[in-house]
Amino acid sequence: MAQSVRQALSGLRELNLAGLRDLADLSFNRLSSCAPSLERLSLAYCHLTFELGPVRGSISPQDSSPSQFSFRNLLRFVQERAGRLRALDLSGTGLPPEALQALGQVAGLQLQELSLHSCRDLSTEAVATLCFQQPGLTSLDLSGCSELTDGALLAVSRGLRHLRRLSLGKLQRLTDAGCTALGGLRELQSLNMAECCLVRGRELAQALGSVHGAPSQLASLSLAHCSSLKPRPELEHQASGTKDPCPEPQGPSLLMLRALQELDLTACSKLTDASLAKVLQFPQLRQLSLSLLPELTDKGLLAVAGGCPSLEHLALSHCTRVSDKGWAQAASSWPRLQHLNLSSCSQLTEQTLDAIGQACRQLRVLDVAMCPGINMAAIRRFQAQLPQVSCVQSRFVGGADLTLTL
């Protein structure tokens, strides 16, 4: 039996053990020994135990615990597989700074991807050391590492020159000053700064959108729930005048990100129709979220339709000032739309469904949950009109009384 398992797993390159809280040294060792070709390992949210003080020496098989999963045991595994291991996910394991340092300095280890999401004890100094130890990283997730400051981002920009994906979500000590370092990451393709509540945007735009420092390959940008993000006053002024159909950025601007395909501005509550009209000019953009924007109206919707005609995924949940009138004009601009979220848009009625049904013939998924102006009869007519729509979320439509339904 054991031999057949070894044969079956001999070519395994990726192993996901995330969330196995009862994983122990013995069970991990038995499983990993059957996969000598392993290159990618996820232990996210596994219960790792850490000993105080530096990790030294080796661990013999008889030292492996049958009831606990120890960092010493994991370190031994990494030392043995250093030449092949390329991706490691230790998110939510409580990894302390000294353990990260011990991992980073393993001889022969050349990680390309490392995820440390929600490792809240990690320090800025530990991240700086990691960047020196593992300069070949192309993907790094530091989201939720709440002790990190601007210095961590500076260390990343200096030490990880080939970084392509960077996640900094929920770093609530990160400020505009730290954002200036992003200009040094010339190969960056994906950046997540969701819930960085101190980031206001000007320095971010300068770093990402400056002519000399822009990571021109940036395709995905998330600024969701960046509550301090706001437009520059000059953008508001410019947007109120005659609209240039082919705007050229005056100074630092996100408009320089010509390769952008995904943009998340969910709950950036200070954004207005005027700022969106000036900034959202991305002909190649495929995915956009403007959910929870209280200032977005039909005027802003039409501006987005004109500036982003290639959208395939659009989220406008809880945009309560967008109406049927706006959709009657905007729908025809999005013939490629496949996923549309309009949940909790209180002004919309079946007229919007009619406009979407006529113009968005490639639609596959629609969410109109909690839209009081849309009833089930209208949804059934819509599904008959577009039978290729595989999923319609319609819970609590038509103003259902939640106190009776729940």
Image (spheres, helix red, strand yellow):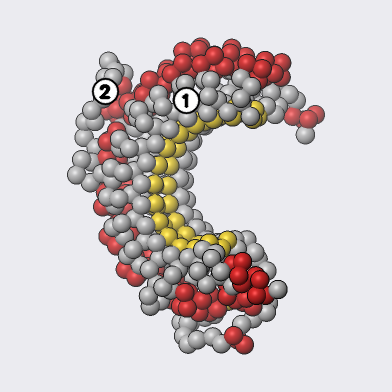
The percent position of residue 77, horizontal first and vertical second, equals 51, 76
Q: Is residue 132 above or below residue 180?
A: below
Res. 50 visible in picture: no
Query: Which quarter of the rendering shows the C terminus?
Result: top right
Vertical arrangement, residue 393 with respect to residue 333, above or below: below
Please tell me the numbered disc located at residue 336.
1
> Which residue sits at x=67%, y=79%?
66
Label 1 with label 2: CB-CB less than 8 Å: no
Badge 2: how crowded within 10 Å, few (<14), some, or many (20+)?
A: few
Residue lying at 39% horizontally and 62% vertically, measured from the top left: 112
Q: Quadrant of the N terminus?
A: bottom right
From the viewer's side, name the closer residue of 388 and 171: 388
Density class for disc 1 (Cα within 10 Å; few <14, some 14-19, many ≥20) is some
Q: Residue furthest right?
A: 404
Helix, strand or loop at disc 2? loop
In the rendered image, which residue does mark 2 sit on?
A: 246
Nearer to the camera, 11 or 41: 11
SS at circle 1: loop
Q: Which mark is residue 273?
A: none
Q: Amino acid at mark 1?
A: Arg
Query: Eyeballing the image, is 282 above or below 85?
Result: above
Front residue (pair 119, 26)? 26
